[in-house]
Image: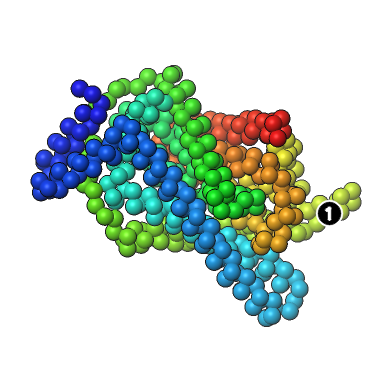
Amino acid sequence: MTYEKEIFNEIENKLKKSDFTKTTQKNTFDVDKIILHKIFGVIIFILIFTSMMVITFYIAQHIELIIELIIDKIKNIADKIITNTNIKFFINNCVLITAESILSCSAQIFSIYFFTYILKESGYLARGMFIIEKTMKAIGLNRDAFIPLVSNLACNVPGILSTKTIKDKNTKIITVIISPLISCTAKLPIYMLISGIYFSGIKRSLLVLSIYLLGVIIGAIISKIASSFIKKNDTTFITEIPSYQFPNIINIASLSSSKAINFIKNTAPLIFIFTLTSWVLNNIPTNNTENKKETYLHKISKNIEPVLSTLGFDYKMDISLLGGIFAKESVPVILKTLYNINDSDNKEDIKNKIPIQTGITFLIFTMIYCPCINTLITIKGELGSIITVFLMLFYIVLAFIVSFLFKIFINIFF
């Protein structure tokens, strides 16, 4: 029996046991002939996921513009009300920029969750397991790992927790290992900020999409290598195939909004405190007589600066990466605050400080390097402390190697 017939027989059996009418059964089966086709199904799969990501980026860009306009209005009001120069500088260049970044992050989180929920409620996400099965087998996984991996697009924590549904223990281990390489919503604001310095419109979206795809490719390579060392049991299982249905947009919007609100409630305060501390330390000079411009933030970052400077990163980028270990959303907030990226007028100045090669290298590094603390805690719960520490170091080393190779490639050919 061919692979495609096995899928159709499984779907037919499920539909026969359901309470649907014969008409509904026939319609569902007819649609699945196209959706699960070995050629057209893959094309549709790629188009759906690519469209989802591009639309998400497009919406996020426009929401950013609206938030920027609102913050600019508030700045104008603050300029008129506040007379003290130091307080005005602090409000405009720290508090309002941080608030703008946090709101932009929450909008992007809403967008990615919204489209992920649509795919899930429509019944397509479950069918994606069958479409991608051959690809999953090629990299040493099975279709059981598909939904946990896709869940990482929203957040690595629920993505890793959902690996509990994977029956084969070794497949679960590999899935957990590569999960942080699937960019979550927390990394999207970083990609949007850095890409927005150099590009706009479709070019910006394509750059961000390329970073997502690079993470998937690296994850696939690691999975293939790991599977050659780890034996897995070939498991055959029946998967529940839900019927097609129109997603409840109001319900989805409500669920997505709650995710964005939870981010503002739970993560935003930590980001604000870390950003505020970074900004203050960056504006207080040390007593260094040799370098009067040196700030306490620069002094603190000196321990890691020699290593990351080989990638072209300065101390401000280094500090943002440290903040990213606590929460990835803090990276763009810290960068915006320290570089004063608050309008289009100073983008040329930012381009001079962060050349495009360094900017893209930074994107690659942040996509791979150490996951946030919540993700590390979740990995520890699934794989134990020793493996978690090893993986944390592995991601950092891998990020440095891949970023360094990219930098060499750019310098040679461009």
Secondary structure state at the residue bearing disc 1:
loop
> Observer-nearest residue: 158 or 10?
10
Residue 75 image position (x, y, % from top left): 65, 72
Q: Quadrant of the C terminus?
A: top right
Residue 321 image position (x, y, % from top left): 62, 45
Relative to 66, say whether 228 is above or below.
Answer: above
Left or right of 123 on screen, residue 47: right
Relative to 258, say whether 27 is above or below.
Answer: above
Left or right of 124 on screen, residue 30: left
Identified at 38% across, 29% down, the residue is 135
| Residue type of the residue flagged with mark 1 | Lys
In the picture, residue 102 is in which quadrant?
Answer: bottom right
Identified at 23% across, 37% down, the residue is 33
* Residues packed near mark 1 inside 10 Å, few (<14), some (14 to 19) or many (20 plus): few
Count the labels in the image: 1
Residue on which the image places disc 1 = 293
In the picture, residue 50 is in which quadrant?
Answer: top left
Residue 305 image position (x, y, % from top left): 73, 41
Identified at 50% across, 55% down, the residue is 58
Left or right of 377 on screen, residue 170: left
Q: Quadrant of the N terminus?
A: top left
> Observer-nearest residue: 260 or 279?
260
Residue 143 visible? The answer is no
Relative to 394, say whether 185 is above or below.
Answer: below
Residue 23 visible? The answer is yes
Residue 117 image position (x, y, % from top left): 35, 52
Identified at 44% across, 62% down, the residue is 261
